Image (cartoon, rainbow, N blue to C red):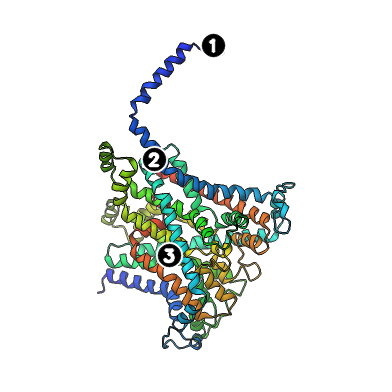
Amino acid sequence: MLAVQPSSIKRAAENRRPARTALPNWRREQRRAFTFGLLPALLVLVAITLGPTIYLIVTSLTPLDPVHPHSAADFSDPIGNYRALMADRRFLNSLEVQLKLSAATVVLQLAVGLGVALLLNAGSRFLEAVRTAFILPMVLPPIVVAVVWKVIFTPDVSPMHRALTAIGLPVHSLIANPDTALGAIAVADTWEWFPFTMLMVLASLQMIPAEPIDAARIDGAGRLALFRYILFPYIRPTLVVAGLFRLIDSIKAFPLIYVLTNGGPGTATEVTNYYAFVESFNFSYWGYGSAIATLMVAGVLLLSWFIGRLGVEAERDD
Amino acid sequence: MISERAVVHGAAVLLLATVLFPALWMLQLSFRAGGDIFDLSLTFTPTFDNYRTLWTGLFPGSFSNSIVVSLAATALSLLLGVPAAYALSRCRFRARRSIALWILATRMAPPVAFTIPFFLAYRFLGLIDSLAGLVVIYLTFNLALVVWMMRNFFDSVPRALEEAAWIDGCGVWSGFRLIALPLAAPGLGATGVLCFILSWNDFFYALILTRTRAMTAPVAIVNFMQYEGWEWGKIAAGGTLVMLPVVVFSVVVRRYLVRGLTAGGVKE
């Protein structure tokens, strides 16, 4: 089987060689220089993202906590944490809370963001300035957003509670009531993040060619018909991507919950991210917390992969 | 008859006022004197009392920690990320696409997933409650952003100029320094500002990885809630101070801000 003619190998080598030497020397040097520029960033990225992720997964296979220092290398029951999670009521509850919060905030943000974008989508300098001001909630430090809403939801200092009392409709604190706490957080979160959808929709509205819109207008299309049949089909992919981005980010919700409710009352607003934080840093069950975080990463990667696929499809359409 | 334009403008202003109201309420709270905070009246004599007490406490230390960490994290991520972005823009690497995907994945990853391993490693290395530790963990989101944004900026700088320089015997990196970088300067500035804002805004990492020495301003605000009772005036004043640089910077780079905020979402 190995009886390959030496001459044929030589010929193959000769065939390849001219192509190589055709590449001028400086081009190869250039390539080396580019690699040299790319390498430090790549190495650092590997060290600070891939490294910790692997370490996280390894830790999730151990019962690591500070009381048992040798538990870092205890792999006697690698899926113990995961098995315990499946029977952990508090974890399952956190998934449910997460699902509710994510669904509510994504839908609200898409609706409000789309509405505001449509209102502001006219080419005037004035509206352009207004658009910039609308971005504010999203660039504010998340902790400031949390403080702002803590004020709104604390009856002592809240203008909302004052106004409601003044018109004879006093309400108890919304964040201290397990039935309304999650809704209150959803409102604050929507306030913070609707500008994201707004920006994305505005960007895609500006890319719509003028011809179909003009044609529809000439044919007598009303405002609603114009939106339904011309604008909406154009911005639908953007809405899907914006929704998926917000869905992924909603999994990371933290400062609002930390400041407004601390996960409570009870566990009414304890999302999975918050539960992972509590297990890892309030109780120091690092192994257990790592298992929750690993599951979260898996979920996020799955969603990212989905976005990636959408991106590939969009590229094909171009 | 009122024009449609006027109606739209009026509605936009009304909506904007509603949206900004909660933030403005916090702002006015910070200028109220202690006894005035629970007052029902809308008029009051503004004072700087809250800011003055804030400035005599431990808050200035946290505030300067925030500045130092954010500046260092920005500088380091630009230093590492800008050459990498240039290389990715000018050279067709085979792994180009997977690098882009990886960067997107870093942006998506939940912070708690990074925090646990970093926390454990920092305990071992003695980096808990250190500014250096924060700077390194801020690279996890900043570096990806720099590479992502700067690649787009370099893509929009025409190659022809550099190619001419290369033919004249200019090396790759002197071409980068003398031609591409100056042309991408506005983008560089915007990217830097965005990195600064992201580091400045961080709460989660600082909450877990710092105690007292390296505490940043956002964590300090939360501590007003927990240890010193509910001092609304101080909380509002601290919140205002933390929000100030972000608002100023946002106005300065508003044109590029949109690009950075929707990075990965909108195809350029």
3 vs 2, front mark: 2
Residue located beneath label 3 in the image: A139
State the image coordinates of residue A250 (x, y, percent, origin top left): 53, 59
Camera-side residue: B33 or B24?
B33
Type of amino acid at the residue the image marks with label 3? Val
What separation in Å lies between label 2 and label 1 (alpha carbons)?
Answer: 42 Å
Earlier residue among tags 2 and 1 = 1
In the displayed structure, A184 sits above or below A26; it is below
Earlier residue among tags 1 and 3 = 1
How crowded pointer 2 is (Cα within 10 Å; few <14, some 14-19, many 20+) is rated as: many
State the image coordinates of residue A277 (x, y, percent, origin top left): 62, 61
Chain letter of the residue beneath label 1 in the structure image? A
Chain letter of the residue beneath label 3 in the structure image? A
Q: Are marks 1 and 3 on the same chain?
A: yes
How crowded pointer 1 is (Cα within 10 Å; few <14, some 14-19, many 20+) is rated as: few
Instruction: Label 3, secondary structure: give it.
Output: helix
Q: State the quadrant of the N terminus of chain A.
A: top right
Type of amino acid at the residue the image marks with label 1? Ala
**Residue A3 has which mark?**
1
Number of callouts: 3
Residue at the spot x=46%, y=81% of the render?
B52
Residue at the spot x=44%, y=15% of the render?
A10
What separation in Å lies between label 1 and label 3 (alpha carbons)?
Answer: 69 Å
1 vs 3, front mark: 1
How crowded pointer 3 is (Cα within 10 Å; few <14, some 14-19, many 20+) is rated as: many
State the image coordinates of residue A107 (x, y, percent, origin top left): 49, 61
Residue located beneath label 2 in the image: A34
Residue A150: tell me if it is visible. yes
Camera-side residue: B19 or A171?
B19
Q: Are marks 2 and 1 on the same chain?
A: yes
Residue at the spot x=68%, y=58% of the render?
A285
Instruction: Label 2, secondary structure: give it.
Output: helix
